[in-house]
Amino acid sequence: QKEVEQNSGPLSVPEGAIASLNCTYSDRVSQSFFWYRQYSGKSPELIMSIYSNGDKEDGRFTAQLNKASQYVSLLIRDSQPSDSATYLCAVNMRNYGNNRLAFGKGNQVVVIP
Amino acid sequence: GAVVSQHPSWVICKSGTSVKIECRSLDFQATTMFWYRQFPKQSLMLMATSNEGSKATYEQGVEKDKFLINHASLTLSTLTVTSAHPEDSSFYICSATRTGTYEQYFGPGTRLTVT
């Protein structure tokens, strides 16, 4: 099993709809979870951090964490064309030192006007 | 905020020359900095982890003598690509973390083209 998996292919959503992204991770004792947004040709930008089970909302973004299921998700409400980007899930791993994170391969989101 | 800068943002060099890329944390002290490489339409690939005042830890398959990393202070890390070849052309991105946290803040990246 990969450390962090983001299996869905490119996601196309109409403007104004909800985009839902999923991520699973392999290390049961991971404590820190992040979502990054990366526009084409740019570096990743941290958009959400979550550390406790449940939901965390920040503007149009909601992160959901379920440690028992080793699952973290990101919802983007009222999707805008500016949300079109690749979203990376990142998780800390206990076998990593130096505050390293394991990154998923990313999910591309395309918001159609 | 947590701002990380990189310089230069892009560079073109001739094969066989060396290129130095700087990564600075502008408004926080970064105990740990990371260097990534990303090829077009591919995932981030971690090259090395550097801690202030100690030797960098390189990922498997990354040549330490080719990619020299120096983390001279709590706000500055440098990556030097030595004897660059066209296959080293890529997007190099650094990130930094505050002491005791896992949140990584990325610099804007440096696009290297070796001719």
Image (tube, rainbow, N blue to C red):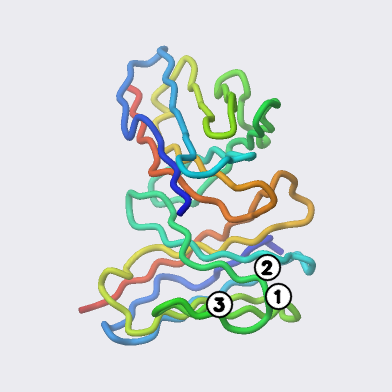
Q: Residue B3 placed where, x, y %?
A: 44, 47
Which circle marks residue A25 in the picture? 2
Q: Residue at x 54, y 30 (%)?
A: B77
Which of A77/B38 is in front?
A: A77
Residue B70, above or below A18: above
As drawn, is A24 to the left or to the right of B91?
Answer: right
Residue at the spot 72% in from the left edge and 66% down from the top edge: A31
Label 3 belongs to which residue?
A73
Alpha-carbon neighbours of circle 2 within 10 Å: few (<14), some, or many (≥20)?
Answer: many
Is residue A76 positioned above or below A42 on the image? below
Secondary-structure class at tag 2: strand
Which of the two residues, B88 or B8, is positioned nearer the viewer here?
A: B8
User: With B14 as the anchor, is B77 left or right in this view?
Assistant: right
Q: Residue at x 44, y 27 (%)?
A: B21
Task: Estimate the spatial distance between the alpha carbons at disc 3 and disc 2, rounded to whole Å.
Answer: 11 Å
* A6 versus A71 height, above or below: above
Q: Is residue A106 left or right of residue B69?
A: left
